[in-house]
Amino acid sequence: MLPAILINPFVEKPFGRQTEMKQTIIIKCTKCGGLMMATKTQKTKICPYCGAHVNLEKAVKVAAAKDSFEASTILRKLKSEQGFPSRT
Ligand SMILES: [Zn+2]
């Protein structure tokens, strides 16, 4: 029997077509608590506020969006909510 060398294992990958819509998550910096966006393919992200290398697996995921546009909308909303220090 011949090995099936002509079959490309990547062809049947179910997520192969989702390159245009990058799922974007909003995470909390493990150091300063600042909110930032990251794509799911990223492993680390440098915090724009404190410069810390944030491990996306350890960071708290605040929200998930279907693309970066939606994520920025959510992020803006979250930030405006955070603007009230006396919220309960
Ligand atoms: Zn930070």
Image (cartoon, rainbow, N blue to C red):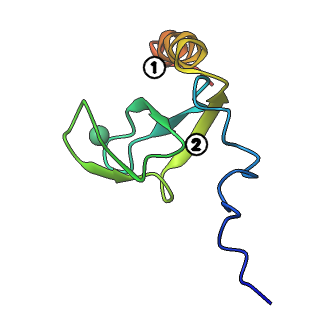
Front residue of this view, candidates 65 and 15: 15
What residue appears at the point 28 percent right and 38 percent down from the top-left corner?
A: 47
Quadrant where the C terminus is found in the figure: top right
Horizontal and vertical percent position of residue 12: 76, 52
Secondary structure beneath label 1: loop
Crowd band around label 1 with a 10 angstrom C-alpha radius: few (<14), some (14–19), many (20+): few
Q: Farthest residue toward the left?
A: 51
- Is 73 left, or right, of 9 in this rendering? left
Q: How packed is label 2: few (under 14 Cα within 10 Å), some, or many (20 or more)?
A: some
Q: Residue at x 76, y 47 (%)?
A: 14
Q: Which residue is mark 1?
A: 85
In the rendered view, does 87 fall on the left or right side of 14? left
Residue topped by disc 2: 61
Q: Is residue 56 left or right of residue 17?
A: left
> Residue at the spot x=71%, y=83% of the render?
3
Quadrant location of the N terminus in the rendered image: bottom right
Residue 22, compared with residue 5, is above or below; it is: above
The disc label shown at residue 35, or none: none
- Tell me what residue is drawn at x 59 percent, y 16 percent: 74
